[in-house]
């Protein structure tokens, strides 16, 4: 395929999934906004004033990056996992894509790009929802965008792998409930790891979500528990590993050939 045909294939897949998301906007976007408002109300108005500050910033401001990441992680993962699962079992259009000369890397890039778009939109909505509770002056725009894009990309890749293997809807729902949500909450959403005992500090550094939250917290607030360079290296390594796994799965047709 030449460059123009590659772009058409890439654009077609993205356009289809983005339009699908906006057609079901109430189902796809409102729950994250409503849930975030409830978090901000509870931690801002009810608990924030009692807890005080962490790293010299109000508690509600400290938890905003983590709550944004919670929404982005779950949204990016479930979006790509569901659309790939539906394309595989219901629409059967994944068979048409696989039968075409579209290379595996482009299929991965297109589905992941749709997850990044969805994740960034959700991040913007949650950030806007936080402003009435804790107006923030973004410390570093580039760091904020970098870690939001990397978060959406990594968990879109993870969602794609889940969608390839999934045999039913339960196979998709179980991962956000029993894996993603605990990883986010144990990644420092509501606390700094410096406040943890040494054992739990060491445990936290093995949690990849910790580095996502840490990077976004630096971008929004200018505070960080570990260096940004370390966070970026960990996340890049994870992204390359997940991309390689997805390329192998789609290249071999594992979980796709019925």
Image (tube, rainbow, N blue to C red):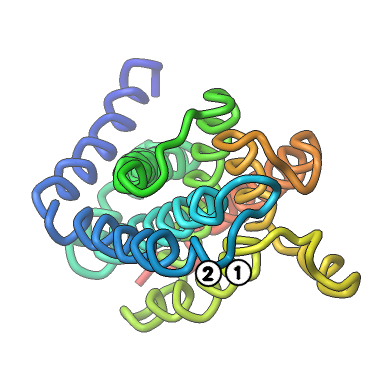
Residue 73 as seen in the image, left or right of residue 245: left
When the figure is inspected, residue 92 is found, relative to residue 100, above or below; the finding is below
Q: Which residue is mark 2?
A: 180
On the rendered image, what quadrant is the N terminus found in?
A: top left
Q: Nearer the viewer, residue 19 or 36?
A: 36
Residue at figure coordinates x 70%, y 48% from the top left:
55
Question: Which residue is outermost to the right?
Answer: 198
The span from disc 2 to disc 1 (Cα, nearest Å) is: 5 Å
Residue at figure coordinates x 19%, y 49% from the top left:
21
Residue at figure coordinates x 86%, y 66% from the top left:
202
Pointer 2 with pointer 1, Cβ within 8 A: yes
Residue at figure coordinates x 78%, y 34% from the top left:
229
Circle 2 packing at 10 Å, graded few (<14), some (14-19), many (20+), is some
Q: Secondary structure at mark 2?
A: helix
Residue 57 as seen in the image, left or right of residue 24: right
Q: Which mark is residue 183?
A: 1
Q: Quadrant location of residue 166?
A: bottom left
Q: Where is residue 87 shown, x and y percent of the image?
A: 26, 59
When the figure is inspected, residue 114 is found, relative to residue 138, above or below; the finding is below
Residue 252 as seen in the image, left or right of residue 34: right
Q: Where is residue 58 shown, x and y percent of the image?
A: 56, 50
When the figure is inspected, residue 49 is found, relative to residue 14, above or below; the finding is below
Question: Which residue is outermost to the left?
Answer: 23
Q: Quadrant location of residue 203?
A: bottom right
Q: Quadrant location of residue 56?
A: top right
């Amino acid at each position: 395929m030449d460059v123009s045909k590659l772009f058409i294939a890439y654009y077609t897949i993205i356009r289809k999934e983005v339009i699908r998301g906006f057609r079901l906007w109430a189902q796809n976007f409102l729950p994250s906004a409503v849930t975030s408002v409830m978090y901000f109300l509870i931690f801002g108005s009810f608990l924030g004033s009692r807890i005080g500050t962490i790293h010299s910033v109000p508690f509600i401001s400290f938890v905003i990056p983590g709550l944004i990441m919670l929404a982005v992680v779950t949204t990016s993962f479930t979006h790509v996992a569901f659309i790939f699962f539906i394309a595989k079992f219901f629409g059967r259009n994944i068979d048409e894509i696989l039968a075409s000369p579209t290379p595996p890397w482009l299929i991965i890039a297109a589905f992941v790009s749709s997850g990044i778009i969805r994740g960034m939109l959700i991040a913007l909505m949650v950030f806007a929802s936080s402003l009435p509770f804790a107006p923030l002056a973004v410390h570093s725009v580039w760091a904020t965008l970098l870690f939001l894009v990397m978060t959406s990309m990594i968990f879109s890749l993870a969602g794609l792998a889940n969608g390839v293997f999934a045999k039913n809807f339960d196979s998709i729902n179980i991962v956000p409930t029993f894996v993603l949500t605990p990883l986010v909450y144990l990644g420092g959403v509501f606390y700094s790891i410096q406040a943890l005992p040494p054992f739990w500090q060491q445990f936290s550094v093995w949690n990849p979500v910790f580095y996502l939250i840490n990077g976004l917290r630096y971008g929004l607030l200018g505070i960080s528990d570990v260096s940004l360079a370390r966070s970026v290296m960990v996340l890049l390594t994870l992204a390359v590993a997940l991309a390689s796994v997805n390329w192998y799965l789609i290249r071999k047709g594992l979980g796709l050939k019925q």
